[in-house]
Every structure is written in C-alpha cells, then in structure tokens.
Amino acid sequence: MKTEPCPWCLGDDEYVEYHDREWGVPSRDPQHLFEMLILEGAQAGLSWLTILRKREGYRRAFEGFDVNRIAAYGAGDVKRLLADAGIVRNRLKVNATIGNAQAFLELEAGEGFSEFLWDFVDGLPKQNRWRKLEQVPASTPISDAMSKELKRKGFRFVGSTICYAFMQSVGMVNDHLTNCPRYPVVAEMGS
C-alpha cells in the first residue's frame, strides 16, 4: 500500500508540519488540552489553517494560555484582546475563552480536566480505520456527549463538531487515514 500524508494537510508547509508532529498525538496535559479546546472553538466559521497561523498570536495574547490569569480577565483585558490583530477579534469567542478558563478551574479542582475529557473514550484513544477522507465524520455520539457535558459545566464554543475536531487534534481518536505514515506511529502512542 502506498503511503502519503492525510490529504487535508497538503498544499501548505505549516499544515503538513502540524499534521506530522502534533495532530493526533495523545495529550493528557491539562494546559495543552485547554489551549487546543480554545483554538478549536476559535476556528468556528473559519479554517484551521487560519487559526494555526494565529496560534502564536493566541499564545502571546492569552499569556501562554495561563488559565489562572485568563480566568481573572476583566473588561480592560477584553478591550485589549479585541484590538489584537494576532487573534480572531470576536467578542463572543474572547468572552468564551475567559468563561472557559473559569469553568476549567472548577473542573480541574474536582475530577480534573484531563480525566474528565479522557473518560469519554474510556482513557484510551479510539483507533479508527478510515481509508478515505470522506469516511471521517464531523461529529460522533461521543463528541455529542462531550459537547453536552462541557456546556453543562459552563463551557462555550464547544459544539459537537468542535469537540470532535478537538478529539482528533489531541489524540483521543486516531483519524489519520490508514495509508498515512503517521497512522501506525500515532496508533502505537495510544496503546
């Protein structure tokens, strides 16, 4: 079988780099999970490449995704963020990031953010076996359940499609196509 990267990343070196080094790698680090959930939410209505190109701007604007600092942001911070061309300047998304940091802290103080999320896949990455991009779903019953629970816990910009993209990015599911050279590498990381 001929191997080639997943077709969604072709045509842009930054996209290929993200695909080859990060996408689908299982992550249990709460801060990284928070960053990815925020970035996936920021993508709503936009392309992932747009967000990927603004990622460093997000890291700078949100102080390295320091959840404690973000949770304490006030009106002045919102004004600063809405003037920052390094991020998507959408008031709803900015306010959601602040609210999500507050919800994260509550969840982290209880069962833990990472544990909460990984429980949706029983603690192990789901190894899908898609052969064609058209087979990969935009959402699943698991992402539906995750979305519902995150919303119940106060998170915003966490619809089912956003949750599934998040699950793909942090390796809760292995959605590399089976002929992609990263498929077996990521599968091994999840075992």
Image (cartoon, helix red, strand yellow):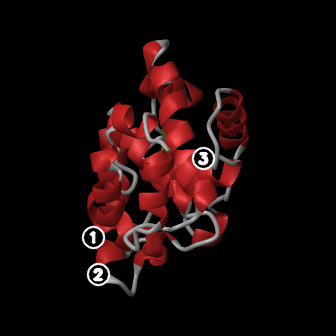
User: Is the Cβ of the residue at disc 1 closer than 8 Å to that at disc 2?
Assistant: yes
Earlier in the chain: of badge 3 and badge 2, it is 2
Residue where numbered disc 3 is placed: 163
Q: Which residue is at the front of the view, 125 or 183? A: 125
Query: Quadrant of the rendered structure where residue 156 is?
Result: top right
Q: Compared with residue 39, is residue 131 higher up or lower down, i.e. above or below?
A: below
Badge 3: residue crowd in 10 Å (few <14, some 14–19, many ≥20): many
Query: Quadrant of the rendered structure where residue 11 is?
Result: bottom left
Q: Quadrant of the N terminus?
A: bottom left
Residue at the image point whose x is 68% and y is 39% from the top:
147
Looking at the image, the residue that sits furthest to the top is: 110
What amino acid does circle 3 point to?
Cys
Earlier in the chain: of badge 1 and badge 3, it is 1
Q: Is residue 53 left or right of residue 44?
A: left
The Cα atoms of the two marked residues, 3 and 2, are separated by 25 Å
Q: Which residue is at the front of the view, 50 or 8? A: 50
Q: Position of residue 168 (x, y in %)?
A: 49, 51
Q: Position of residue 38 (x, y in %)?
A: 48, 50
Residue where numbered disc 1 is placed: 17
